[in-house]
Amino acid sequence: MSRNADNWLLKVTDLTKIYGEPNENTLALTGPEYNSNICPETDSIVACANISFDLYPGEVLGIVGESGSGKSTVVKLLYLDMEQTSGSARFMPYIDGSINMLDASSQKKRYIKNYLMGMVYQNPRDGLNFNFTSGGNIAEKLIMAGNYHVGDIRARASDLLIKTEIPVLRMDDQPVTFSGGMQQRVQISKAIANDPPLLFLDEVTTGLDVSVQAKVLDLIRELQQDLGITMIVVSHDLSVIRMLTDRTLVMKNGRVVEGGLTDQILQDPQHEYSQLLVSSLL
């Protein structure tokens, strides 16, 4: 991991997403101190507010919190799956890294998603087309990034399936015939097909058997070590965060309540909510 103040890969500043019609008091009347992200005056929902952090090349950042804390919203905003209410995100690999990619044109957003980012969703159905074969899903990502050579596409798909421990003989099988763990591994193959500098992982082990979870986590860790991909890992499970991440943000009611090195947060959490999460892990 390469880290200095001027070497950031992604710079996020005051990222905010509010559903409904907020008023001037909405942010002040929501958050951890109120144990709610619903504005009592307008019923608007503050999914996340004033999220700021820098992410560095090769770093794995964890975002942890209970359901409804806003962690998945942050990732979906950064992956350009939804539009922010306010805030900015500057992404250095993009040729115009000084601009806020969240306000870029639709064409530029497609380029960023297809060439420079990958996403692994909690539910494989959100990341895979179940009408396509496993190889076809990988091909879809490659074609969207301008690779149209059938031989090259199948060779790349084969390499990725091998890397993620999917039998190449199943390249022409549909993911619907796979186990949940295999579907997640196909989704990972698709997400890294174009060697993106940034990969998002959103609750990737939720719903999987414990033994399958361990295999998926081992795979992610090996890929990160081998390829040096910068990652943002979202989870409600601190054991996942502990295994994968260098640094962690703790979220509650749409706000970051604590941030720091993962080891520090696990060994000496400062915020009472972080302490509660850590105590549940012991």
Image (tube, grey):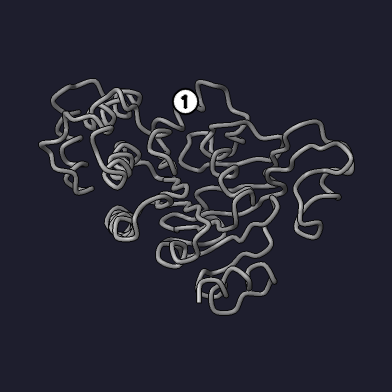
Where 108 sits versus 276, above or below?
above
Q: Residue at x 47, y 25 (%)?
A: 110
Residues 131 and 64: in front is 131
Q: Quadrant of the N terminus?
A: bottom left
Relative to 224, does residue 90 appear above or below in the rendering?
above
Residue visible at 27% across and 33% down in the picture: 175
Q: Is residue 192 left or right of residue 266?
A: left
Judged left or right of residue 250, residue 205 is left
Q: Residue at x 81, y 56 (%)?
A: 34
| Residues packed near mark 1 inside 10 Å, few (<14), some (14 to 19) or many (20 plus) | some
Of 231 and 132, the residue lying toward us: 132
* Above/below status of 193 relative to 266: above
Q: Quadrant of residue 63?
A: bottom right
Instruction: Count up the numbered dots.
Output: 1
Residue, far left: 169
Mark 1 highlights which residue? 110
Where disc 1 sits, the SS reads helix
Horizontal side, residue 124 vs residue 241: left or right: left
Q: Nearer the viewer, residue 262 or 99?
A: 262
Q: Position of residue 151 (x, y in %)?
A: 13, 25
* Horizontal and vertical percent position of residue 165: 19, 49
At x 15% / y 37%, what residue is drawn?
158
**Which amino acid type is shown beneath numbered disc 1?**
Arg
Q: Position of residue 150 (x, y in %)?
A: 17, 22
Residue 227 percent across, percent down from the top left: 29, 52
